[in-house]
Each structure stands twice: as C-alpha cells, then as structure tokens.
Amino acid sequence: MAEKLEGVARAEALAVLASAGWSRVTGRDAIEKTFVFADFTRAFGWMTQVALVAEKMDHHPEWFNVYKTVNVTLATHSVNGLSGLDVTLAGKMDRLAG
C-alpha cells in the first residue's frame, strides 16, 4: 500500500524531481511535467510505453496529449497526495523519454 511522502523524504524527492523538470501543481499535492517529442508518433509511442509500465505498477498518470506534447500530472489518489509511486513513475517516464 502506498504511503504519502512527508518530511525529509518528501523534500528530498521533490528536489530530485525538480532537477528533472517536474514541478508542484498549484493548489494540489501533485507534480506535473510537460514532455515534447519530435512528432505525434513519438509522443504516442512514449505514452504506450508508459501505459505498460503504469499498468504493471497499478499506478496510472493523469495526462493530456496534443500532437507532440504530453502534459502529465502525478498524484496517488489513495493517499490524497504524493507517494513513492509517483516518484518511481516520474523517473521511469523520464528514462523512457530519453
């Protein structure tokens, strides 16, 4: 079961995420990032790869795609905020994006 990130663990995770281009969502305990790819096919291919990872994790992103741009928001609904699942999925998204 996921646990909400708090204290030092939360601060450290947010610092690492910020260095990778993730930012906090205003008014919500969540993180967001915009990924821009060369074209729609690459964006959709990345989304497909992420979907397979997310399904295995049973942790699904909120995302919005227009052409080559994908806006992602991550939060763990069961804890009403950020958890280690979000940090792990963000890292996998970044690696898959190259």
Image (tube, rainbow, N blue to C red):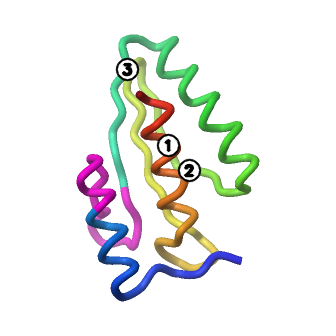
Q: Is residue 57 left or right of residue 69?
A: right
Quadrant the C terminus occupies: top left
Q: Which residue is mark 2?
A: 61
Q: Are marks 2 and 1 in contact (CB under 8 Å)?
A: yes
Identify residue type, mark 1: Trp
| Residue at point 37%, 68% (across, down) | 13
Disc 1 vs disc 3: which is toward the camera? 3
Residue 64 in the image: x percent, y percent? 47, 38
Q: Is residue 29 left or right of residue 26?
A: right
The magenta stretch is 16-31
Q: Which residue is mark 3?
A: 37
Tell me if residue 80 comes above or below residue 22 in the rendering.
below
User: Marks 2 and 1, how far apart in space?
Assistant: 6 Å
Tell me if residue 52 comes above or below residue 31 in the rendering.
above
| Residue at point 53%, 50% (across, down) | 62
Q: Which mark is residue 88?
A: none
User: Marks 2 and 3, how far apart in space?
Assistant: 18 Å
Residue 20 colored in magenta in the image: yes
Q: Residues within 10 Å of mark 1 (few under 14, many from 20)?
A: some
All told, the count of numbered labels is: 3
Task: Kindly indicate the quadrant of the structure image that contains residue 28.
Answer: bottom left
Q: Earlier in the sequence, mark 1 or mark 3?
A: 3
Q: Nearer the viewer, residue 56 or 78?
A: 56
User: Marks 1 and 3, how far apart in space?
Assistant: 15 Å
Q: Say what secondary structure mark 2 lies in.
A: loop
Q: Nearer the viewer, residue 8 or 53?
A: 8
Q: Is residue 58 left or right of residue 73?
A: right
| Residue at point 55%, 21% (across, down) | 44
Q: Which residue is mark 1?
A: 63
Residue 69 colored in magenta in the image: no
Quadrant the N terminus occupies: bottom right
Identify residue type, mark 2: Pro
